[in-house]
Image (cartoon, grey):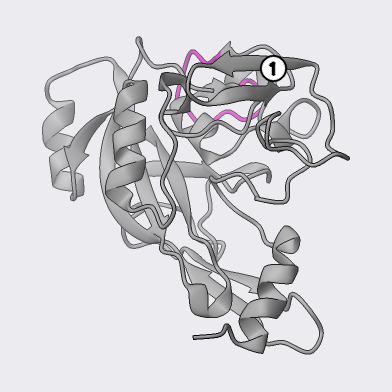
């Protein structure tokens, strides 16, 4: 079946779409060196990963010391505009590791997300990086926390691909800053860090927060593209043993 005019228009203007976690397919900064367009930005460093290729990196990786909500000092302030905000996504922020490479789950370990990926695919990549599954409820998180293992928790959200509107899918991570008071925060793709959801509300439970995004019209004669991210699972990020790129 041929694609609709709307789908063709949206695909044509995909470079204007915003992603929380995945690399924009038209990015001139974060695509693998082997897949980058001719006019791409040459990164100051490339990290070669067997089975993946050369990952552009704009500064050395910085490992954070705390998951508390403290943007100016979190990973030496690397998530802020004054430093390397555009090169760190929700996964970097969720792991408290500023890789400065728009990191992808599992990539450091030779894993790439498949087309039309699912929550299970993203979680698998994160597990390869050192994260572990916790469960689908906050009660499961509180129960896990009783073990006293050093580390923090993150929530994984998934936005399924929708070919009818030209949306290729995305994922998003939300970080727990204080489990006692259930305070969470997030970094929406290349945007700044915030402790609000996408509707401007404080995040107390990622599973019930508002994760709807109006991508806006990609051309003046087409309708707005509205996508949403749905809660998938909670995961644990141990203080030691996690690395990403």
Asked whether the viewer can see residue 153, the reply is no
64 part of magenta stretch: yes
The residue drawn where x is 75% and y is 68% is 13
Task: Count numbered badges in the picture.
Answer: 1
170 part of magenta stretch: no
Percent x, y for residue 234? 27, 42
Q: Give the main secondary structure, helix, strand or loop, of the magenta stretch.
A: loop
Residue 4, picture quadrant:
bottom right
Judged left or right of residue 76, residue 112 is left
Name of the residue lying farthest toward the front: 1
Tell me if residue 1 comes above or below residue 143 in the rendering: below
Percent x, y for residue 34? 68, 30
Q: Foreground: 197 or 61? A: 61
Secondary element under disc 1, as helix, strand or loop, is strand
Judged left or right of residue 189, residue 106 is left
Query: Which span of residues is magenta-colored?
Result: 63-73
| Residue that label 1 marks | 46
The residue drawn where x is 88% and y is 40% is 39
Judged left or right of residue 123, residue 169 is right
The residue drawn where x is 82% and y is 85% is 220
Q: Quadrant of the C terminus?
A: top right
Judged left or right of residue 115, residue 225 is right
């Amino acid at each position: 079946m041929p694609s609709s005019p709307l789908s063709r228009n949206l695909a044509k203007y995909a470079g204007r779409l915003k992603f929380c976690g995945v690399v924009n397919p038209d990015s001139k900064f974060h695509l693998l060196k082997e897949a980058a367009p001719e006019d791409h930005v040459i990164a100051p460093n490339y990290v070669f990963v067997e089975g993946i290729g050369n990952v552009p990196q704009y500064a050395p990786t910085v490992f954070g010391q705390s998951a508390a909500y403290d943007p100016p000092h979190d990973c030496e302030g690397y998530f802020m505009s004054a430093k390397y905000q555009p090169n760190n996504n929700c996964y970097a922020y969720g792991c408290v590791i500023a890789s400065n490479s728009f990191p992808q789950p599992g990539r450091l370990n030779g894993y790439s997300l498949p087309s039309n990926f699912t929550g299970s695919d993203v979680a698998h990549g994160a597990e390869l990086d050192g994260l572990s599954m916790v469960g689908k409820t906050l009660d499961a998180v509180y129960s896990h926390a009783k073990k006293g293992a050093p580390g923090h928790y993150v929530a994984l959200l998934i936005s399924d691909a929708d070919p009818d509107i030209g949306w290729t899918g995305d994922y998003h991570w939300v970080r727990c800053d204080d489990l006692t008071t259930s305070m969470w925060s997030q970094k929406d793709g290349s945007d700044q860090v915030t402790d609000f959801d996408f509707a401007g509300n404080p995040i107390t439970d990622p599973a019930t927060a508002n994760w709807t995004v109006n991508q806006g019209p990609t051309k003046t004669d087409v309708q707005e593209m509205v996508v949403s991210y749905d809660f998938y699972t909670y995961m644990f990020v141990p203080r030691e043993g996690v690395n990403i790129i």
